Amino acid sequence: MEIRELFLENVRKYIRPQTDPVAVKVVYGDDEPPEGAIMPKDKYGYPLTICQGVSAARRMGLTMVFRMEDHACPPALCAMGYLPTENLLAGKVTIPGYAGNEEAAKKIEAANVLLDKAPKSIWLAPYETATFEPDVVLVYGNSAQTTRMAQGYAYYTGEGVKSNTLGRLACANYINKVLVNQEPTIVIPGGGERVFGQTQDDELVFALPAKFIETTAKGVEAVHQAGYARYPTGFHGITAQPKMPGKYYKYLMPKE
């Protein structure tokens, strides 16, 4: 069984996310975009946020290609290397909405991973139908599902999965940070992704570098087979002895 098929089969069977895992590829060369891919500026006449592109891939099955002109979010354009970062890193767009002073604003922005070189484009597609090999795979799910993904990763690596969330610029975490550091991360989507990408309040992002796809898929299955942790969560009370109000037995049950 090839790696992609293994990953999709195990994630669907043991994690059961509501939306498709998303393949992400950051392209620096002259690779031709996938056939039939949507470039927002050409297709719609206006740019989109990249989190809208992720949602279009995972919810609608679309393949999206984001060039510089396809990005609608200026902070994301800075994070992806398309625009100068001086004002971003100085905290000018963070005060007062996300920071109470200049020092805090600078620390917030410095915590983001910014790409040194702008890619030619960023490709997004449902992992199942992607015609390219991804750099990163994104799995959206609730906290229990995300925990199961972390258990799968840890099964063979012995390492925990870090979470890095500043409440904004989630794309810089689940794409840039994972790509640069080659470590999985759990990201709580920010306000922009909820407003524009329609990401739900209970959703987290498990972002996985491509090199861990196979071992994580096998780990997810192994943990399930061991029986200690499964999704949906098996509640002990389901098979516990039920206790009803005393009068139910007194007036409704036959006397022994």
Image: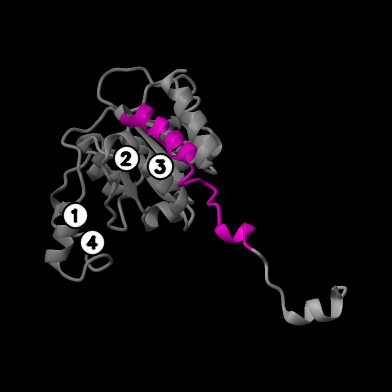
Which residue is disc 4 drawn over? 94
Magenta stretch: includes residue 209: no
Residue 248: image x %, image y %?
79, 77
Magenta stretch: includes residue 232: yes
Give whichever of discs 3 and 4 has the lower sequence position. Answer: 4
Which residue is disc 2 drawn over? 154
Residue 128: image x %, image y %?
49, 27
**Helix, strand or loop status at disc 3:** helix
* Dot 1 alpha-carbon crowd within 10 angstroms: few under 14, some 14 to 19, many 20 or more: many
Tell me whether the residue at label 1 lies in contact with that at label 4, contact meaning CB atoms closer than 8 angstroms.
yes
Give whichever of discs 1 and 3 has the lower sequence position. Answer: 1
In 3D space, how far apart are the residues under numbered discs 1 and 3 (Cα atoms)? 28 Å
Give whichever of discs 1 and 2 has the lower sequence position. Answer: 1
Which residue is disc 1 drawn over? 109
Which corner quadrant of the image does residue 3 belong to?
top left
Question: Which residue is located at x 36 percent, y 45 percent?
Answer: 72
Residue 12: image x %, image y %?
53, 35
The amino acid type found where label 3 is placed reads Met
Q: Residue furthest right?
A: 254
In 3D space, how far apart are the residues under numbered discs 1 and 2 (Cα atoms)? 29 Å
Mark identifier at residue 149:
3
Relative to residue 80, is residue 33 depicted above or below?
A: above
The amino acid type found where label 1 is placed reads Glu
Tell me whether the residue at label 2 lies in contact with that at label 3, contact meaning CB atoms closer than 8 angstroms.
no
Tell me whether the residue at label 3 lies in contact with that at label 4, contact meaning CB atoms closer than 8 angstroms.
no
**Residue 208 at least partly seen:** yes
Specify the principal SS of the magenta part.
helix
